[in-house]
Amino acid sequence: MGNQNNIQRMFKPTFGNRPEQYIGRDGVIEQFMEGLREPVGSRNRCTLFLGQRGMGKTALLLELSDRASKVGYIVARVTAHEGMPKAIIEQFQLNGSQYFKDEKRKVTGVTAGVLGFSFGLTFSEAAERQYGFRSKMSLLCDKFAEKGKGALILIDEVRTSAAMREVAAAYQELVGDQKNIAIAMAGLPHAVSSVLNDSVLTFLNRATKVELGTISTNLISAYYEHSFRTIGIDASDEIVDRAALSTRGIPYLMQLIGYYILQYTPERGEVTNAIMDKAEKAAMEDMEDNVFMPILAPLSDNDKIFLKALAQCGGTVTTAELQNVLGKNGPAIQPYRKRLIEAGIIEAPRRGELVFAVPYLPEYLLKESDI
Ligand SMILES: Nc1ncnc2c1ncn2[C@@H]1O[C@H](COP(=O)(O)OP(=O)(O)OP(=O)(O)O)[C@@H](O)[C@H]1O
Ligand SMILES: [Mg+2]
């Protein structure tokens, strides 16, 4: 257990952190960055990323934040809680302040500068008092434009709420006013569930929707190889491949397996199959607690019975097989099917067929008798 410092650097199996190295998703990132180069209001400038737990939504927003900052955007990154509009303004003031440091308080006449900023990005008392989110954003965008900067809002854990409604409405108005603004949101697959029906849903549905699935196991394999070499532990090609394949392309699982491999391998030692067994087992326990359980928690007992039946059939399952196992007819199955597809737990590769969309979830369902 001698690799403590390196483990902390190379693999961070916790949620919401910035990975040591961001892997894959080049196409997704490029598409959004391209949007930032397109005219205000173009569709890619308003993107919604949807993905299951541990697929790397938060990590992606962090990556976008970094890249957008480098090409002239001031970024506000928030989660979609009730205080979001205020938090967005504060983030812009905080992250933009470095560009407006040398701006002294303006001597204001009776007519000029009564509303707006007192100095830097600090609003005047009148603006603070009288202006709401949209107007403050408008002032900030104009201010940013003076320095050739745009405004990028990143919203994590997106869901419908009054706060989200306010931000969505303001975004559309700001685009209408030709402000250089863009927005990227990330959420669980059912953030755009059809049972929701309000203005936020319309806004989310108009956004460019991007599904965050698994990442390439070839890239994961290359990263493992590189990490083990950097740290100075031996791993044969077979072991590296075994580790990469075990992740099934789930970013969180990649971090977990990497972390436990380093944890169990002695300094300058070799990664053996026995170490792999242990690492995979420990990683899977964390997956159960932090991915599978939270995915299943909001489901009804009948949803779970449906999923268990699907797991028992194994692989790609036809609706007919499922009807047999459940002893129900097609129309009775339909609502479960629809809800679980929307929740991103299962998917229909072809008409009349269903598969699990979450790797390892069927194995977990079969193993746990008390779900
Ligand atoms: N592309 C990537 N390359 C390397 N590591 C990644 C990548 N994407 C995510 N990770 C890592 O995977 C783990 C989970 O990612 P993250 O916290 O972004 O998931 P999430 O989708 O936001 O999950 P949740 O829905 O539970 O919030 C983190 O440790 C993160 O650093
Ligand atoms: Mg997250």
Image (spheres, rainbow, N blue to C red):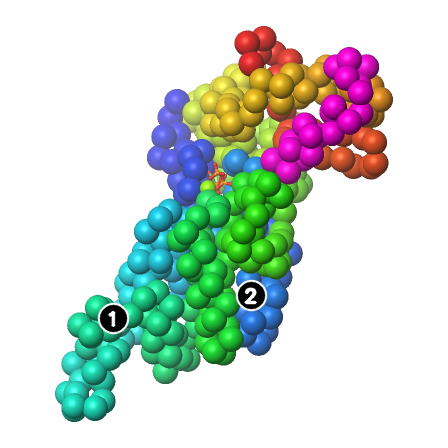
Work out which residue is located at the far top of the displayed protein and give it: 369
Q: Amino acid at mark 2?
A: Arg
**Residue 76 screen position, x and y as percent:** 38, 60
Query: Taken as a whole, is the magenta stretch helix, strand or loop?
Result: helix
**Residue 301 screen position, x and y as percent:** 58, 18
Magenta part of the protein: which range?
323-343
Q: Quadrant of residue 96?
A: bottom left
Vertically, is 168 above or below 227?
below
Q: Does residue 271 appear left or right of residue 127 in this picture?
A: right
Q: Amino acid at mark 1?
A: Gln
Vertically, is 176 above or below 87?
below
Q: In the picture, which quadrant includes the N terminus?
A: top left
Which residue, given by chain and number where applicable, does mark 1 sit on?
130
Q: In the picture, which quadrant includes the C terminus?
A: top right
Q: Nearer the viewer, mark 1 or mark 2?
A: 1
Vertically, is 25 above or below 225?
below
Secondary structure, mark 2, is helix
Which residue, given by chain and number where applicable, does mark 2 sit on?
45
213 or 171: which is nearer to us? 171
**Residue 220 screen position, x and y as percent:** 60, 39
Estimate how packed mark 2 is, as few (under 14), some (14 to 19) or many (20 or more) residues with alpha carbons within 10 Å: many
